[in-house]
Image (cartoon, rainbow, N blue to C red):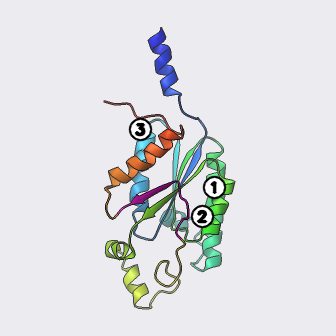
Amino acid sequence: MQIVQQEIEREVAYSTEGFTLWLTGLSGAGKTTLALALEAQLLARGLRVERLDGDVVREGLTRDLGFSKEDRDKNIERVTFVAKLLSRNGVAVIASFISPYREARARARRETTNFIEVFVNAPLATCAARDVKGMYAKAFAGQIKDFTGVNDPYEEPESPEVVVYTDRETVAESAAKILNYLETRALIPVAQSA
């Protein structure tokens, strides 16, 4: 009977609160790839998970917005509202957005439950080399204005909870750093060893 009790305690030795895992970084840094890996891991641990991705959200919730600073702020404001509703209701939210401005990320931190900022760090040259859409090339050529990291600023996080370096870490290594952080905060169950 005590073994069963210990197993139950181990399974619930984490908060059942939701959280908002906010992945920020340049276009091409690997936010979406990392978010997909994290989503699979969290689902495997039995959590309720919603992934909010920049490209997907712009197809629906924010398709009326452009890329001016005002529109980018409005984009993050809407995403923050959704993340707030989900996280306060026990959902693990993975938000992967360039979100270039510190103040918009600070607002998301204030308004969502258990906000964790993850800086998905990759050099500009690496991000440009990964760009299959050719957006960086167009921005460097002056064909696109207000492109983050080229002719519009990206304000790096000053004190993120986690920093991953996707130019020198595998997706699995970066995901493991984030999962370890979530485990130490008791926001997710510890992975069972095989």
Q: Which stretch appears magenta?
A: 156-166
In-image side of 121 versus 20 (left or right): left
Using the image, determine if residue 42 lies above or below residue 37: above
Identified by mark 2, the residue type is: Leu
User: Does the residue at mark 2 contact the one at mark 1 (Cβ under 8 Å)?
Assistant: yes
The verdict on residue 161 being magenta is yes
In-image side of 81 versus 164 (left or right): right
Q: Give the residue pinned by disc 1.
A: 82
Name the main secondary structure of what is drawn in magenta. loop
Observer-nearest of 129 and 159: 159
Classed neighbour count for the residue bearing mark 3: other residues with Cα under 10 Å, few (<14), some (14–19), many (≥20): few
Q: Name the residue: 44% across, 13% down.
A: 3
Q: Secondary structure at mark 1?
A: helix
Q: Position of residue 153 (x, y in %)?
A: 53, 79
Q: Give the residue pinned by disc 2.
A: 61
Q: Earlier in the sequence, mark 2 or mark 1?
A: 2
Identified by mark 1, the residue type is: Val
Q: Earlier in the sequence, mark 2 or mark 3?
A: 3
Using the image, determine if residue 110 lies above or below residue 26: above
Q: CA distance from mark 3 to mark 1?
A: 23 Å
Q: Secondary structure at mark 2?
A: loop
User: Does the residue at mark 2 contact the one at mark 3 (Cβ under 8 Å)?
Assistant: no
Residue 135 in which image quadrant: bottom left
Q: Give the residue pinned by disc 3.
A: 44
Q: Name the residue: 59% across, 35% down.
A: 16
